Amino acid sequence: MSFFQRMRQAPPAPRLDDFGFAELRGGGSRVLIVPALGGKIAHLELAGRQWLWASEVTPYGLPDENASYDETGDTGGYDECFPTVRACKVPTWVRAFGGVPLPDHGEVWSQVPSIDVRTSPDGQTATTTWMGRRMPYRLTRVVRVTPTGDVECEYEATNTGTDRVPFLWSAHPVFPLTSTTRLDLPAVERDERVGQLGPAGQRGRLGEVALRLLRSGRAGGEKKKPDHALHGKALFESLTLRGSSSGRRFRLRESQRPDPSEA
């Protein structure tokens, strides 16, 4: 290969190591959180398997809220959408915030949150906090990996202003689906997860989400390249992925449904 051919080669794609991450471990489980990528959960490893999909097309890069999430931020993993999912404007009749434009997939995926990592007898935890830019709120996510390997996420939104704040929240994990993967969904109950935060200091509990691996066989099986990725838009109380060749199951469930009257 000539010198000029080497010069024309594209630089290597950025890796997670280039951005830095917080790592939580416990009971054979491993979680990686990347603050520089909007607090993305990039790895969720249980029983020797990575349960989150990663894009082979969109490279990791510093997020830009003025760009399309699908074109720049949809690198896989587990993101948060708040206070909206689609790009939109707050309805004009909303006091103080009517007409405020909100970016695609919300504000939090494109900002660098604060993160606090601690270890206790209950396991290792990472508390990630985002602050509202266009409306006054604080969104907090606590990820805990217990000594037994369970992964738990707790969410809380707090109004830091004086007027009610409308919002829509959605967790945004992307799962790999292969020809040997089975997806089990319960009966769908329509739930838009729309609410509003009351006057200053009032908190709204968004509900707790617990991730558990249910073993029905030894962890094993060969690694395969995902054929598809699951982008869930509907909302369910639980979701289960099954690897029929390995016997492993991954379950995402909501342990407490949020009460809109508390928001």
Image (spheres, helix red, strand yellow):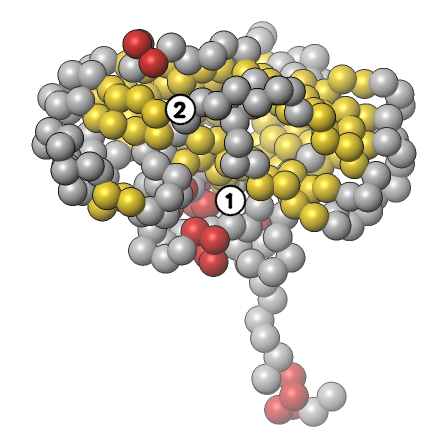
Q: Residues within 10 Å of mark 1 (few under 14, many from 20)?
A: some
The amino acid pointed to by label 2 is Arg
**If the image is split into quadrants, where does the N terminus sit?**
bottom right
Hey, which quadrant is residue 236 in on the image?
top right
Q: Residue at x 55, y 58 (%)?
A: 59
SS at circle 1: loop
Q: Is residue 96 left or right of residue 262?
A: left
Marks counted in the figure total 2
Distance from disc 1 to disc 2, alpha carbons, whole Å, reads 32 Å
Q: Residue at x 86, y 26 (%)?
A: 247
Q: Is residue 36 left or right of residue 232?
A: left
Q: Residues within 10 Å of mark 2 (few under 14, many from 20)?
A: some
Q: Is residue 39 left or right of residue 254?
A: left
The amino acid pointed to by label 1 is Gly
Q: Position of residue 261 (x, y in %)?
A: 30, 9
Which disc number belongs to residue 20?
A: 1
Which residue position holds label 2?
193
* Residue closer to the observer: 108 or 95: 95
SS at circle 2: loop
* Residue closer to the observer: 185 or 54: 185
**If the image is split into quadrants, where does the C terminus sit?**
top left
Q: Position of residue 61 (x, y in %)?
A: 47, 56
* Residue closer to the observer: 119 or 133: 133
